[in-house]
Amino acid sequence: MGGTNPYISTPKIQRPARKFKITFTNNNQTIEVDPTKIPYGETGLPGSILDIALHNGVDIDHACGGVCACSTCHVHILKGGESCSEAEESELDMLDLAADLKPSSRLSCQCVPNGEADLVVEIPAWNRNLIREGNP
């Protein structure tokens, strides 16, 4: 499932110009992102953390298919958040519905890194699908 949400405007994003890394703390997995291969799929904005994660086998729940219509892909950006696209009003509205909201919270389907810094991302424990991931 994927696509776009016709009820919100597409955010302005800066595509990365160089390779960068995203480390997911939950499984201690670091992914090197090659901007020439973005987008990887049709889930989330092109080059979003969700798009990158799913392509590299990191499972993040995304009930709405990555179109900013729920808060299930909520993540915490622990490092490198300044290199990510700014949250639009529609994302902030959805984040209001998320549990464990922090200043570092973003929807992974809307958060697009520009490649100027490496990222460290935490998928909140309550948001991990343990059946699919097979780990606690």
Image: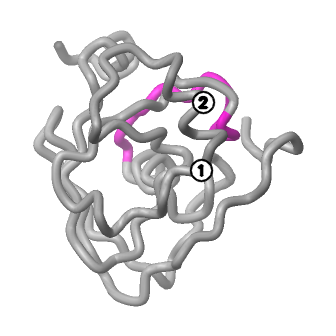
Residue type at tag 2: Asp
**Which residues lie in the magenta part?**
57-68
Identify the residue at the far bottom of this view.
17
Secondary structure at badge 1 equals loop
Q: Which numbered disc flags the more N-terminal residue, 2 or 1?
A: 1
Binning the other alpha carbons within 10 Å of mark 2 as few (below 14), some (14 to 19) or many (20 upward) gives: some
Instruction: Tell me: 11 left or right of 57.
Output: right
User: 75 or 82: which is nearer to us?
Assistant: 82
Q: Residue at x 14, y 40 (%)?
A: 25
Instruction: Tell me: 41 left or right of 19.
Output: right
The residue beneath circle 1 is: 88
The residue beneath circle 2 is: 93
Q: Position of residue 98 (x, y in %)?
A: 45, 19
Q: Residue at x 60, y 30 (%)?
A: 93
Image color mode: one colour
Q: Position of residue 84 (x, y in %)?
A: 39, 63
